[in-house]
Amino acid sequence: MSRPPTPSGRVTSAKIVIAGGFGVGKTTLVGSVSEITPLTTEAIMTSASVGVDDNRQVPGKTTTTVAMDFGRITIDRDLILYLFGTPGQTRFWFMWDELVRGAIGAVVLVDTRRLADCFAAIDFFEHRRLPYLIAINCFDGMQYHDPQDVRDALAISSDVPVVACDARNRESTKHVLISLVEYVLTMRRSRAVARA
């Protein structure tokens, strides 16, 4: 995404939320693309989480985000994105309202083996009218489902972007963030034209 510098030469910053189900790769995504050492609030899962956190689908997962992840990436000479990863478990959802305050948009990271885990995030952003895109996390580097099939399964609007990514890969993740920014800008231009 190459844009001319802003007339004043000022740097613009924007907040983006990374959401999705438990163990879908949110912390990995933030860590893979952040140009600073990401702030994470990972805690070791203990026996206290038995019966509360369902890790049957991700049996090797031993930690969980208990507050948020935070990272930063400079996309262009005048655009910096601040990334806020949400916790995936329902017991921490009370923090989501604060995490999305001031965000321009959100990435809903999806594991196609557990699509139902992202329904709550989609509902949350649609209810708040916060633009979002779906990022299919291609575990093991394999994309098992066509984006249109994922769109149909999630019953989302045809204008919501659905992109594939590898949350471990910086360039792949950067592409997701650029796609979201472009989508948000397109939506804002369309609204401005409609109001004019």
Image (cartoon, grey):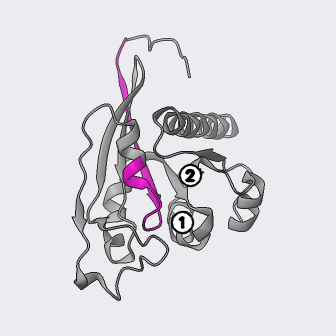
Element under disc 1: helix
The reply to whether the magenta stretch includes residue 170 is no
Q: Quadrant of the N terminus?
A: top right
Looking at the image, is mark 2 or mark 1 earlier in the sequence? Answer: 1
The answer to whether the residues at label 2 and label 1 have Cβ atoms under 8 Å apart is no
Magenta highlight range? 9-28
Quadrant location of residue 6? top left
Can residue 132 be seen at all in this image of the molecule? no
Which of 17 and 23 lies nearest the eye of the viewer?
23
What amino acid is at disc 2? Asp
The reply to whether the magenta stretch includes residue 15 is yes
The reply, left or right, for residue 135 in relation to residue 93 is: right
Q: Quadrant of the C terminus?
A: top right
Which of 42 and 188 lies nearest the eye of the viewer?
42
Instruction: Please identify, in this view, whether the residue under mark 2 or under mark 1 is nearer the observer.
Output: 2
Image position of 48 with respect to 107: above or below: below
Can residue 73 be seen at all in this image of the molecule? yes
Which of 161 and 195 lies nearest the eye of the viewer?
161
User: Residue 96: x, y in percent?
Assistant: 36, 63
User: Residue 195: x, y in percent?
Assistant: 65, 39
Element under disc 2: helix
User: Residue 43: x, y in percent?
Assistant: 22, 65
Residue at 25 percent of width and 52 percent of height: 40
Mark 2 closeness class: few <14, some 14–19, many ≥20 residues within 10 Å: few
Which residue in the protein does label 2 denote? 140
Which residue in the protein does label 1 denote? 127
